[in-house]
């Protein structure tokens, strides 16, 4: 549907030890009660020439949006949905020198979608929606939460050649508890089993011309 949106943002001087990026946006739909509000805050800290840390916070609140619910025999069911999401992430880098460094990447994303009862509709062949007299067979509400943390050490041991040691853990949860708030959902997420793995990747650059010269000699 037709809509109008606008946002405003600020970004401070990256040459300073502390800098911040921030953005606020709003979207309004005509002839509809649908609206969306967004906010993003990214403070960054440069503790030294070797150590940098960036934190990011994103919040989205979408109200009264027509969204897909389920695919029924010869019928596509839509519903009016309210959705709220929060994302927290941290990016950190520490360089020992020009060839060795440690990187940290953390992300937690939560999103809850709640459909309004008795506000379902059917998708028509012309793309329009008409009121439905049926309800979905399953609960369409969703509570989604995920946690990822990567910690890696990289070493450039030769020109074009690199070894990367990576530790990764992750947690995932998806259920219908859309009435839970962010902190309650996070508490439930931390009860889920933690997946962990360690990997080592080595990339070695071979100069074809050097190898050819060796065999020629």
Image (tube, rainbow, N blue to C red):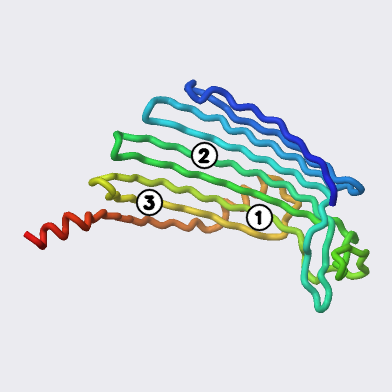
The CA distance from mark 2 to mark 3 is 17 Å
Are there few (<14), some (14-19), or many (20+) residues within 10 Å of tag 1?
many
Residue 150, above or below 56? below
| Residue picked out by circle 3 | 166
Where disc 2 sits, the SS reads strand
**At 54% from the left edge and 55% from the top edge, which residue is drawn?**
171
Q: Which residue is mark 2?
A: 90
Residue 161 horizontal side relative to residue 194, left or right: left
- Mark 2 nearby-residue class (10 Å; few <14, some 14–19, many ≥20): some
Q: Quadrant of residue 215?
A: bottom left
Q: CA distance from mark 1 to mark 2?
A: 20 Å
Q: Are marks 2 and 3 in contact (CB under 8 Å)?
A: no
Q: Characterize the local packing of mark 3: few (<14), some (14-19) or many (20 or more) Cα atoms within 10 angstroms.
A: some
* Up/down of 20 relative to 58, above or below: above
Position of residue 145 measured from the top left corner of the image (x, y, whole percent): 62, 52
Q: Secondary structure at mark 1?
A: strand
Count the marks.
3
Say which residue appears at 72% left-offset and 60% top-offset: 176
Q: Nearer the viewer, mark 1 or mark 2?
A: 2
Q: Helix, strand or loop at disc 3? A: strand
Which of pointers 1 and 3 indicates the residue nearer the eye?
A: 3
Q: Please give the residue where the numbered disc 1 appears in the rendered image.
A: 144
Q: Between marks 1 and 3, how big is the CA–CA gap? A: 26 Å
128 or 18, nearer to the observer: 128
Task: Tell me which numbered mark, 2 or 3, is placed earlier along the sequence.
Answer: 2
Q: Position of residue 182 (x, y in %)?
A: 67, 45
């Amino acid at each position: 549907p037709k809509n109008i949106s606008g946002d405003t943002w600020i970004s401070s001087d990256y040459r300073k030890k502390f800098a911040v990026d921030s953005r606020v946006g709003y979207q309004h739909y005509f002839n509809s009660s649908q609206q969306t509000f967004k906010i993003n805050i990214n403070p960054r800290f440069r503790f030294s020439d070797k150590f940098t840390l960036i934190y990011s916070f994103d919040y989205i609140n979408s109200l009264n949006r027509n969204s897909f619910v389920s695919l029924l025999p010869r019928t596509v069911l839509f519903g009016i949905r309210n959705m709220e999401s929060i994302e927290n992430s941290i990016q950190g880098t520490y360089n020992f020198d020009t060839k060795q460094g440690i990187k940290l990447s953390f992300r937690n994303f939560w999103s809850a979608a709640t459909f309004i009862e008795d506000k379902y509709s059917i998708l028509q062949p012309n793309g329009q929606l008409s009121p439905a007299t049926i309800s979905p067979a399953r609960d369409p509400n969703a509570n989604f939460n995920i946690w990822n943390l990567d910690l890696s050490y990289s070493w450039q041991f030769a020109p074009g050649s690199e070894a990367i040691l990576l530790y990764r853990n992750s947690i995932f949860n998806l259920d219908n508890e859309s009435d839970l708030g962010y902190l309650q959902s996070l508490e439930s997420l931390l009860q889920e089993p933690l997946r962990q793995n360690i990997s080592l990747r080595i990339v070695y650059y071979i100069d074809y011309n050097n190898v050819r010269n060796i065999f020629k000699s």
